[in-house]
Image (cartoon, grey):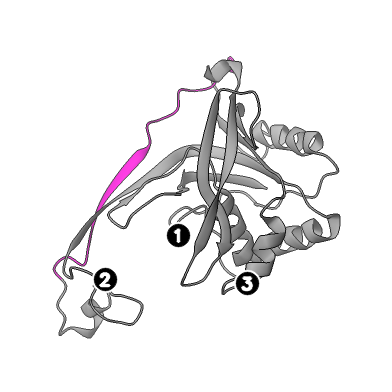
Amino acid sequence: MWLEAPLQSWGHDSKFGRRDSLDFPTKSGVLGLLCCALGAGGKQIEFLARWAERDMVVQAYVPQDRLGKPVLRQPMLRDFQMVGSGYATDNPWQNLLIPKKSDGGKAVGGGTKMTYRYYLQDMAFAVALQGPKSELEELQFALLNPVWDLYLGRKNCVPTELIGQGVHDSLDNALVHADRLAVDEERSQVNRVAVFKVLQGEFEGDELLILNDVPIQFGSQKRYRDRRVTIVKYDSEK
């Protein structure tokens, strides 16, 4: 999978008033994206159980300069928003813009809400999922023919390249294909260079994180469990 967009946001521990983003896609975000492509709503317990332990490797790319060096990444974009400000409840159209609970009642606290949303800027990610070939081919077809719209974290994070990039017989071949996408001048005017890799599990690397991003159940009552990931930075990023 190739995730490229001007803005991306991959939250894993956010509240309504402050929506943070990791520096890379979460496993829950990737599996949610696949469910959208398949048109699979609801809890999806069986689907999530199949993919919970399967390996997922992420490689991050940033633009490079004329010398092939990575351009210093821009700080994370912070977007300040006010939701439900100044709308009249007696106006049927304005009333639709006031935050409400799923049952249509007033949101907790009611009235105007201030929120902060954080976004990664001008990043691209190669995401390699390991699984049976037949299942991967089904997902590849769904990504090229999605049932629902696909976004990279939030609805304003629209991908600028096809997400499904084929089924490969090894991780090395998948990442070689990603490196080609990163420097394909016919596809994009911006060449990119890899700056770090995210491995599922504990390995020798630069940073070990524990993320609560393995979904057990989607739907109205979402449930997650933890996993460990290792960040391996490349020389240009150290």
Which secondary structure lies at badge 2?
loop
- Mark 2–mark 1 CB contact (< 8 Å): no
Query: Which residue in the structure is indicated by mark 2?
Result: 99
Please state which of the two labelled residues, at mark 2 or mark 1, is closer to the viewer: 2
Mark 2 vs mark 3, CA separation in Å: 26 Å
Q: What residue did someone put label 3 on? A: 40
Mark positioned earlier in the residue sequence (3 or 1):
3
Q: In the image, 70: left or right of 197? A: left
**Amino acid type at mark 3:** Ala
Going from N to C along the chain, the mark reached first, 2 or 1, is 2
Return the residue nearer the eye: 168 or 108: 108
Q: CA distance from mark 2 to mark 1?
A: 17 Å
Predominant SS of the magenta segment: loop
The kind of secondary structure element at disc 3 is loop
Relative horizontal placement of residue 108, taking residue 45 as reference (left or right): left
Instruction: Give the left or right position of residue 87, taking residue 32 as reference.
Output: left
Mark 1: secondary structure: loop
Q: Where's residue 16, x and y in %?
A: 31, 58
Name the residue at 68% across, 65% down.
Answer: 47
Percent of width and height locating residue 201: 65, 37
User: Is 16 colored magenta in this rendering?
Assistant: no
Q: In percent of the image, x 63 and y 68: which residue is there?
A: 45
Give the amino acid type for the residue marked by disc 1 in the picture: Lys
**Residue 197 percent across, percent down from the top left:** 62, 31
The residue at 85%/55% (across/down) is 133
Near mark 2 (Cα within 10 A), the count class, few <14, some 14-19 or many ≥20, is some
What residue would you read off at disc 1?
155
Given the image, on which type of amino acid does mark 2 rest? Pro
